């Protein structure tokens, strides 16, 4: 965490190059090992997970091509555990982000395309009580709370009747997260906490993975 606090005040290539070995030893290598261990544990729960750590871990370099903020490095480490990894950000997965400000574990569908969103809404409308029951599950709700995500003001007319009584149909994003104190990521039990979160959200993720097809 100290590395990122210093990087925040020195977010430039010259400083990073001088501290590159420190980054590797204190941040990159430990996080890479954590993700490798996490994938190994998740494979025991979800047979669809076969990705390598390199396909799950996001680079520390920021994409600054279209950003006014030209600082070159992120102030966190993150990875997504899903059958397709970071190559397909629309596919439901468990996203882990660790920074000095927060430690969060997300699940859900954040960037569905137009067809995927239509398919999700169609599935929800066919039996809205099914997803509502999954979201109301005690283990899921105690860990992740409520479903989140931006909503559309206008939706296709065929969904409006269901949307009148089931607000979830208005969503264009479907995600949830649990937050821990940043120092939790440095403790031995962090891996088990994330694995437990995966277990508790798997049924909901599976629902959306099937619904969006």
Image (cartoon, rainbow, N blue to C red):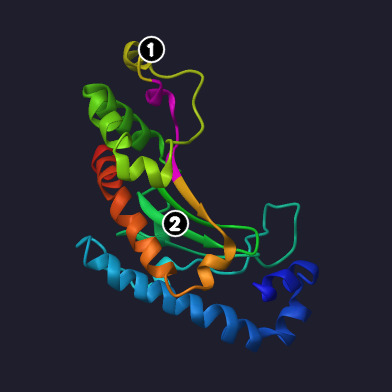
Q: Which element type, helix, strand or loop, lies under badge 2?
A: strand
> Which residue is disc 2 drawn over?
95
Q: Which residues are magenta?
A: 167-176
The residue lying at 59 percent from left, 57 percent from top is 102
Residue 26 vs 133, above or below: the answer is below
The percent position of residue 31, horizontal first and vertical second, equals 49, 75
The percent position of residue 47, horizontal first and vertical second, equals 19, 62
17 with respect to 192 (left or right): right
- Residue 171 part of the magenta-drawn span: yes
Q: Which element type, helix, strand or loop, lies under badge 1?
A: loop
Q: Residues within 10 Å of mark 2 (few under 14, many from 20)?
A: many
> Which residue is disc 1 drawn over?
164
Judging depth in this view, the residue of 38 and 116 nearest the camera is 38
32 with respect to 134 (left or right): right
Residue 65 vs 118, above or below: the answer is below
Kindly tell me whether residue 109 is visible in this rendering.
no
The percent position of residue 210, horizontal first and vertical second, equals 23, 42
The percent position of residue 14, horizontal first and vertical second, equals 78, 80
Kindly tell me whether residue 127 is visible in this rendering.
yes
Residue 36 vs 164, above or below: the answer is below
The residue lying at 74 percent from left, 63 percent from top is 71
Q: Which of the 4 image quarters holds residue 87?
A: bottom left
- Residue 185 part of the magenta-drawn span: no
The residue lying at 74 percent from left, 87 percent from top is 18
Q: Which of the 4 image quarters holds residue 21?
A: bottom right
The residue lying at 41 percent from left, 21 percent from top is 167
Residue 50 disc label = none
Distance from Cα at disc 1 to Cα at disc 2: 31 Å
């Amino acid at each position: 965490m100290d590395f990122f606090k210093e990087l925040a005040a020195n977010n430039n290539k010259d400083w990073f190059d001088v501290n590159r070995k420190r980054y590797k030893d204190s941040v990159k290598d430990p996080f890479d090992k954590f993700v490798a261990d996490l994938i190994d544990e998740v494979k025991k729960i979800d047979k669809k997970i076969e990705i390598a750590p390199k396909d799950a871990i996001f680079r520390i370099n920021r994409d600054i091509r279209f950003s006014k903020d030209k600082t070159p490095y992120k102030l966190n480490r993150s990875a997504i555990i899903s059958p397709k990894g970071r190559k397909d950000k629309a596919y439901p997965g468990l996203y882990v982000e660790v920074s000095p400000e927060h430690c969060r574990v997300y699940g859900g569908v954040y960037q569905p395309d137009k067809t995927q969103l239509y398919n999700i809404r169609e599935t929800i409308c066919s039996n809205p009580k099914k997803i509502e029951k999954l979201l109301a599950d005690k283990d899921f709700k105690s860990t992740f709370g409520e479903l989140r995500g931006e909503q559309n003001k206008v939706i296709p007319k065929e969904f409006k009747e269901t949307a009148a009584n089931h607000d979830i149909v208005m969503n264009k994003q479907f995600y949830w997260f649990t937050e821990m104190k940043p120092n939790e990521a440095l403790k031995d039990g962090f891996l088990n906490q994330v694995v437990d979160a995966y277990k508790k959200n798997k049924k909901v993720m599976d629902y959306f993975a099937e619904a969006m097809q």
